[in-house]
Image (cartoon, grey):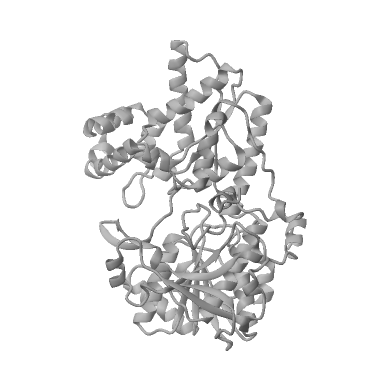
Amino acid sequence: MDISVLQQSRYGYKPKLPPVLAGNIDDIAIDFEQKTAALEDSDKLAAIFPYSYGKAVASFVKGKGKIRRDAMRIGVILSGGQAPGGHNVIAGLLDGLKTGNQASSLIGFRGGPGGLVDNKSIELSPEFTAAYRNTGGFDIIGSGRTKIESREQFEKSAATVVAQKLDALVIIGGDDSNTNAAMLAEYFKQEKIPCTVIGVPKTIDGDLKNEFIEASFGFDTAAKTYSELIGNIERDAASAKKYWHFIRLMGRSASHISLECALQTRPNIALVSEEVEAKKQTLSEITEEICASIAARAEKGMNFGVVLIPEGLIEFIPEFKLLISELNELLAAKEASIKKAANDEARMSIITDSLSKAAAALYKSLPSGIAKQLVKDRDPHGNVMVSQIDTEKLLIAMAEKRLAEMKAQGSYKGSFSPLGHFFGYEGRSAFPSNFDADYCYALGYSAFVLAASYLSGYIVSIRGLAFPSNKWIAGGIPIVSMMNIERRHGKDKAVIKKALVDLDGAPFKAFAAMRQNLSTETLYRFPGAIQYFGPSELCDRPTETLLLEHGQQ
């Protein structure tokens, strides 16, 4: 295979481990801290997970432990969207497994959870895995989004575990994937199948976190990748002095990426979905905020700027939530008549006549392309495909309309040349930063220790991430402690609760303190490309979010 110079060099990188994992494996003991309880719906969760609920937080400490040293067979699954560092989780898991016993085997299931259900696997030998160390992507075994929910799926998964003679199963994924891990751990206990199930926290969106899971892996690399691109655009904007760039970023359910990129790059405007929802802002008010910045900068002769937009913004706008809810009902109830309508105008008339007054007013105010998109594209359940809406184009169109009104009123005298961008897949499979390379390797090694200690239903926890790796604390927490009950598809389901941006947290407050100046001045910050070689303060630096959350910034 013809590989790049960087890839060849990265093969030689040796990820750093927390001290407790870097020594003799027989000197790792488990210290059980406080027992856990769910923050919400504790009684319901205790009933659903009688074998898993209420277990204690586990920390690895120096001492004479009882980690298994016999040959083990562990299965591993990559689940959901890609995140930089996944290959290093597998490398750390394999190295831990082989350190325990060279006769142990790691079995990778192809294509995500579906590979477990259908028993599609490959043995991940050290020789095979070597080509993937410190690289991005999930291509070593592929990923998938199969949800293990039906009785048949659980039975087939159990049959695979028995056929493969697995001692443990490690599921690397986000909130839904680790919900699967918790359900499988409980099912195996109920059915007396001796297979430990361990979860690993992954998602570039950063919404799988709590006091014990300080960051999901991939967030660091993705945010730095996007920030490099944003910084490049800021430099170009300040050079050309004639374009406003509207940049939509990954993060449908939470705005962690947008906030982190704003802290790294200092754009003129960065919208935070959680704040929009808290303030009950309308689309018109958001547009007004953007146009106020555009007008203020134009007064200073700066007809350029940069706006960051979280992918899921419109789902947090209360009036948009109402519109989408009504459209979902309407499109189902009047599908036949809408399809029979003679043209777009007739279809739009049927829709606006059937909506409530508030929803109809919003729908009529939308650019025609967005209005049509809302009713044409629907998911398999018949719902509006909100994730497909080009929010940056919507805000550009709304700004153009409002600026034209302001120009007619004499309150705006500048020129507005907008450009839209979406940064998504560019960040999901990048070469992992040193931080993610180290963090992921430690996660994988810790997953082995948890599995070899029979701690089923746990997700790996590495604490102290704002500090150098020699201060990291490794261990695990019960997955059920992160769960709550949510209503999905008309049924109550136990799921991991997504972590949204905390508006009282240090990262958001730091951004809020500077944004007034950012909106009218040009104070761009240029992070540049991720650095892999050089001093630790340059190459190993964690995200601004982690530093601020731990008082290090």
Counting every numbered tag in the picture gives: 0
Q: Position of residue 208 (x, y in %)?
A: 47, 58
Residue at 47% x, 58% y: name it. Answer: 209
Residue at 34% x, 37% y: name it. Answer: 320
Query: Which is nearer the eye, 356 or 509?
Result: 509
Q: Image quadrant for the N terminus? A: bottom right
Q: Position of residue 490 (x, y in %)?
A: 25, 56
Q: Is residue 297 above or below residue 496?
A: above
Q: Position of residue 102 (x, y in %)?
A: 65, 85
Q: Position of residue 174 (x, y in %)?
A: 47, 60
| Residue 88 seen by the camera | no
Query: Which is nearer the eye, 438 or 26?
Result: 26
Q: Is residue 276 above or below residue 414?
A: below
Residue at 56% x, 69% y: name it. Answer: 474
Residue with the most extreme bottom position: 70
Asked which quadrant contains residue 394, the reply is top left
Q: Give left or right: position of 476 versus 492.
A: right
Asked which quadrant contains residue 179, the reply is bottom left
| Residue 91 seen by the camera | yes
Asked which quadrant contains residue 49, the reply is bottom left
Q: Is residue 447 above or below residue 361?
A: below
Query: Which is nearer the eye, 42 or 181?
Result: 42
